[in-house]
Image: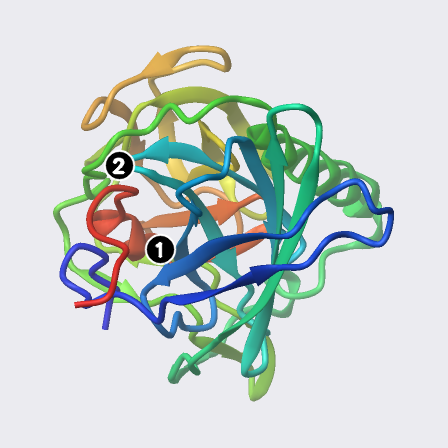
Amino acid sequence: MALRFRAVVTVALSAWVVGSPASGQGRGTSGRLAWHPAMPRQGSLVVIGFAAGGTDSVRAVRGELGGEPLHFELIDGWYRGLGAVPLGTDQTVRARLVIERVGGAWDTVTRRLPVGPRRTGSERLRTDPRFIEPPDSVLPRIQAERALVRALKQRAHEAPRRWQPPFVRPRPGAVTSRFGTARVFNGRVQSRHLGVDFDGAVGDPVLAANRGVVAHAGDLYYSGTTIFIDHGAGLVTGYLHLSSVLVAAGDSVTPGQLIGRVGASGRVTGPHLHWLATYGNVNVDPVDLLGVTLEGPLNPR
């Protein structure tokens, strides 16, 4: 079931004395750390919030979760940021926040967030082996494209947040394959499905899920004609196996804008849209985006 960030009852909220760092640059202070949903699943988005004590003069909050930096904004008295739980996380994930105060003092807060399992099925497929094991001649291309995609995902951390809720579906069609599903090709587990597939015929419209800047629009070996949109603050969405693109790298796009058309390019057996979402290099269920917001209560009921 997709996470619905607005509907979930938040949150496991704790208050404690924040310990001074080993360097001695910080001083102890009270603060509260909160997140929702209370138990994020593997491969999901999570909103993290920090509220300082009433006498604290906090200048900024930064941190990391799951190996990726967090980007905080002050909203309704809380420093809030969006993060991601890697699909392979086992039981807990470590959040580390650095609290910077006026005058240069700082403290750290660490907490292990509980993580729930993602229950996924499997898909058994039979296909020509050449779609599974590429020829040696294309390996340099594949390696170069992987480096390109990793770099554009990391660059999303360098831009401020561009997206605003709500996100929109890139296709109105039915979902034919969900995030996290094990892919069994010719009797062997080869991978997990790291996006969501939408049904569609060649030429059907594909829409931008939210505001952002096109980071890539072109052909890639595995994903065919592909668009990546940088939404800022670490978040990227991808639109794969297209028949055509209607935007170029560097273009600004708006939610619901027509950016391309469904196709069957790349290593696929039929036309569909593969939609993906990443926070940095952490793949998450893109359906989470349809309910994500940084606003709303972060205190317990």
Q: Which residue is pictured at 26% across the width and 44% down the height? A: 293
Residue assigned mark 1:
270
In the rendered image, residue 2, in percent from the top left (x then y), is placed at 24, 66
Task: State the residue in front, 119 or 138.
Answer: 119
Q: Which residue is pictured at 47% across the width and 32% down the height? A: 228
Nearer the N terminus, badge 1 or badge 2? 2
In the rendered image, residue 56, in percent from the top left (x then y), is placed at 49, 38
Above or below for 172 versus 11: above
Q: Which mark is residue 199?
A: none
**Label 2: few (<14), some or many (≥20) within 10 Å?**
few
Q: CA distance from mark 1 to mark 2?
A: 47 Å
Above or below for 195 versus 78: below
**Label 1: few (<14), some or many (≥20) within 10 Å?**
some
Asked which quadrant contains residue 41, the reply is bottom left
Q: Amino acid at mark 1?
A: Gly
Residue assigned mark 2:
76
Q: Amino acid at mark 2?
A: Asp
Label 2 SS = loop
Above or below for 185 versus 144: below
Q: Tell me the quarter of the image containing the C terminus.
A: bottom left
Q: Is residue 160 left or right of residue 131?
A: left
Task: State the residue in front, 108 or 209.
Answer: 108
Q: Which residue is pictured at 70% across the width and 34% down the height? A: 105
Label 1 SS = loop
Task: State the residue in front, 136 or 62.
Answer: 62
Q: Is residue 150 left or right of residue 42?
A: right
Q: Tell me the quarter of the image containing the N terminus.
A: bottom left
Q: Are marks 1 and 2 in contact (CB under 8 Å)?
A: no
